Image: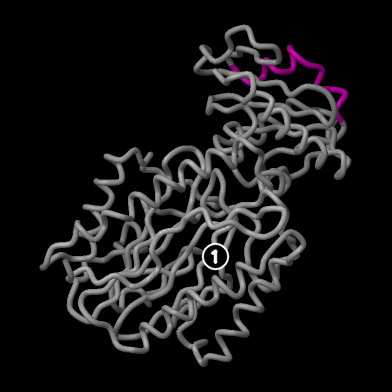
């Protein structure tokens, strides 16, 4: 169970959710998804949580009932219909459910619990609540990011001549799992899938994907994303964007490697990515709009004549970063259409990347914590292109 100090942190999170309920005029919110139960309770369980606009949250657990242990506000149930016996659900006139996260049949069972309530969608509200991290969340993010950076320090030693992109990725995944990686990448959205990250070599970096990641890769028929068996050959760039999942909070980190020497244009574009981190992201602070981070980035890219290669070629992503947390693709999104503004305590990834035909993808991605005065890089790994063939 949670330490008493940690429980206070979870209470802060619930108060944040309640403030949003008050803003929207919603009586209560029902949580069913793993990620939001983890956010509000600290454990994943089968059951529901009900957070009222005011008062204490109630957690109803089907299994494992060992989590109940006599805690106040935590109840053992056999089926969710018992919730109506444990609290008065008839007085609630507006209730938010996670409509984007559940099956139709599960939603209908929950709707019947609140016969007099107008139903709202809780998904966006909960994603908004999770944008600003609590002290415990920031601590856990830091710890995971430190392990993530250490994992990248041994990638160079894993390369062997004759490897394919998939061979190298498997070696990286093995070492990461041995080093404590959970091996799971949680994504928001039913049409988002990934394993432990992405490794893109050569022209496969320009292959379009159906998923909303920054770059695609052909992958396989079962998972059309990332490595596709491309042999690692001289003159090829290798972009490694592997999972920072060493706990419950994610970090994001991309670095570029090469098989021998790359064309000069690849190094120019890579240095442009590093420059964007210095000139755009390091100028960010609370109050900076996410839209301005995107437009400022694009203005520099266009001035350098690099727009045809920016964030893909055949299919170009329309964002340069995203929030991080319990899922890899949290809010806010750094796109020109965003209305979000940076706040202290947000954790965001910034990933200006370029794809050069005949060579591959170059650029870097870092995870940043928004502080009171600016941003702090949580993934300070070496940023230059590293030649895998040099000892």
Which of the 4 image quarters holds residue 338? Answer: bottom right
Quadrant of the drawing holding the N terminus = top right
Q: Which residue is mark 1?
A: 350
Residue at 44% across / 68% down in the picture? 364
Q: Is residue 105 visible?
A: no
Measuring from the top left, give residue 53's x and y in whole percent.
83, 31
Between residues 34 and 333, which one lies in front from this camera angle? 333
Measuring from the top left, give residue 141's x and y in whole percent.
53, 44
Between residues 213 and 305, which one lies in front from this camera angle? 305
Residue extending furthest toward the left = 162
Q: Is residue 132 magenta?
A: no
Magenta range: 79-92
Residue at 63% across / 62% down in the picture? 333
Residue at 32% across / 68% down in the picture? 200
Colour logic: one colour
Which of the 4 image quarters holds residue 71? Answer: top right
């Amino acid at each position: 169970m949670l330490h008493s100090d940690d429980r206070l942190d979870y209470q802060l999170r619930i108060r944040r959710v309640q403030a949003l309920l008050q803003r929207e005029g919603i009586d209560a919110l029902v949580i069913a998804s793993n990620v939001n139960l983890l956010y509000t309770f600290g454990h994943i369980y089968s059951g529901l949580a009900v957070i009222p606009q005011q008062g204490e949250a109630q957690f109803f657990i089907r299994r494992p009932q060992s989590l109940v242990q006599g805690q106040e506000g935590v109840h053992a149930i056999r089926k969710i219909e018992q919730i109506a016996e444990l609290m008065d659900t008839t007085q609630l006139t507006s209730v938010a459910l996670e409509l984007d996260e559940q099956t139709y049949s599960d939603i209908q069972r929950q709707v019947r619990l609140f016969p007099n309530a107008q139903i709202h969608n809780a998904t966006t509200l909960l994603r908004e609540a999770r944008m600003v991290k609590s002290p415990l969340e920031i601590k856990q993010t830091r710890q995971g990011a430190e392990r993530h950076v250490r994992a990248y320090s041994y990638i160079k030693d894993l390369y062997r001549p004759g490897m394919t992109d998939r061979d190298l990725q498997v070696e990286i995944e093995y070492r990461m799992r041995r080093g404590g990686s959970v091996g799971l990448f949680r994504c928001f959205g039913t049409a988002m899938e990934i394993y432990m990250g992405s490794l893109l070599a050569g022209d496969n970096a320009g292959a379009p994907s159906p998923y909303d990641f920054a770059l695609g890769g052909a992958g396989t028929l079962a998972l059309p994303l990332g490595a596709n068996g491309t042999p690692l050959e001289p003159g090829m760039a290798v972009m490694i964007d592997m999972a920072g999942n060493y706990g419950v909070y994610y970090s994001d980190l991309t670095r570029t490697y090469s098989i021998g020497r790359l064309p000069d244009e690849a190094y120019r574009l890579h240095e442009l990515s590093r420059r964007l981190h210095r000139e755009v992201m390091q100028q960010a602070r609370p109050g900076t709009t996410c839209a301005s981070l995107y437009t400022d980035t694009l203005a520099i890219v266009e001035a350098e004549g690099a727009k045809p290669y920016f964030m893909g070629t055949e299919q170009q992503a329309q964002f340069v970063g995203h929030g991080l947390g319990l899922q890899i693709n949290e809010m806010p999104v750094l796109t020109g259409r965003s209305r979000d503004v940076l706040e202290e305590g947000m954790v965001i990834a910034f990933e200006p990347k370029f794809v050069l035909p005949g060579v591959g993808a170059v650029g870097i991605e870092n995870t940043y914590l928004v502080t009171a005065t600016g941003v702090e890089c949580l993934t300070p790994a070496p940023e230059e292109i590293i030649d895998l063939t040099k000892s």
